[in-house]
Image (spheres, grey):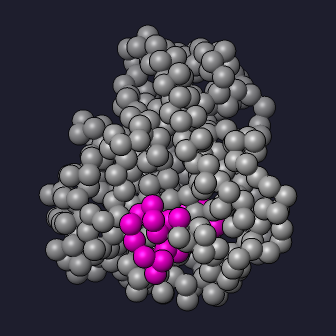
Amino acid sequence: MRLTTAIAAPGQCRYKVGMEFDPFQYMRYAKRIEYADGIYLAGSGMPVAKPDMLGFKPEDFELDSLCNSYGDPRNMDWLADHYGCGGQNVMLAAGSSSANFLAFATLLSRGDRVIIETPGYPQFFSLASLCGAEAIKLPRRFENRFLPDPTELRDLLDEHTRLVVLTNLHNPSMAHMPADHLKQLIGVAAEREVPVLVDEVYLDHLVPGQGDVSAWGLGKNVIVTNSLTKVYGLSGLRFGWAIAPSGMVSRMLDLADVVDPQVVPMTQNLAHRALQNLGRLRPLARRLHEAHWPIMHEWLETRSDIEYHKPEGGVTVWMRIKGISETGNLATVLRNEFATLVVPGEYFQSPGWLRVGYRIEPTALREGLARLGKAIDGFRTH
């Protein structure tokens, strides 16, 4: 059976080729539009980091490193020190996406239930289906500043629940979940001995020391995933990790032996250098947010037909278009008629919403927003 490469509308496909799962349709969409012509307001990560910011040396490009099996000990030690854990709690992976896969595949079996925030990153729902698990939605509502309700979580938990999945900062809204609120949610799950996975790939967009507290350490049932991708502009390294209880890390290593038996040596070398220089990269992300958010905010305030969550950090804003019940067609009109690219809310289980990025340079950003306004006006009229 040959699978089509066309971009499918969200929720309209389910493949059964050996194993049955819901495809990660957003990723297909994102890959297709990243290099398309037009003004790119769809990106959620920082631009690619400049090599001179990282201090790469010729030996970093060798095809060998200190350990190619389970990860360079220099990186393991850095992460253990950063999270205040032992090396037995560190699992290296090819980005946070791979770390999330390893966590899901380790914890879930067919017939299990996994509670996933919604709106939520669509990879989580694809992973649940890949494992044969049932995805149960935990609402994150605009009127509650996208903070999940601990009481609702308690009501959703049952004897078949094997995992709870959250993000901080929240993708797509970029809402920050304070440590005390997150700890309460973790405690509710702990009552039934259910692990909580917190994807923190956007967390370092916050000002250092102002809420950027990792979920690791807030409970014994916590798994944290992260990478150098979104905040640090190092997607090309594919360097990510999970921080988890040692028994779970051991099972993840068993799985990695099957699907990914060697951590790429060059990635390990370059990541080692990058980790030493994160202090130079992180301020770039914060400065970009603080310089470009006012441009986005100014435009939003001219639109009485849009409501939005003010992001605590990052380079995207999550907005609801009043009077438009779906935004997939709006995004298509915007691309085809106005050469501007955004992410429709359907990919995040939210028809009528858009995720719009503001990482591009100011002149292009203003022009892209002007085109978005024209597209909304025309779409509503017709």
Residue shown at the point (19%, 58%) measured from the top left = 184
- In the rendered image, the quadrant that contains the C terminus is top right
Residue shown at the point (43%, 10%) measured from the top left = 302
**As drawn, 329 above or below 201:** above
Determine whether, in the image, residue 381 is placed left or right of residue 194.
Answer: right
Determine whether, in the image, residue 65 is placed left or right of residue 161.
Answer: right
Span highlighted in magenta in the image: 78-101
Which quarter of the picture shows residue 89? Answer: bottom left
- In the rendered image, the quadrant that contains the N terminus is bottom right
**As drawn, 118 above or below 175:** below
Determine whether, in the image, residue 313 is placed left or right of residue 77.
Answer: left
Residue 165's x, y, as percent? 37, 63
Front one among 301 and 179 = 179
Specify whether residue 37 is in view: yes
Determine whether, in the image, residue 199 is placed left or right of residue 42.
Answer: left
Residue shown at the point (58%, 19%) measured from the top left = 369
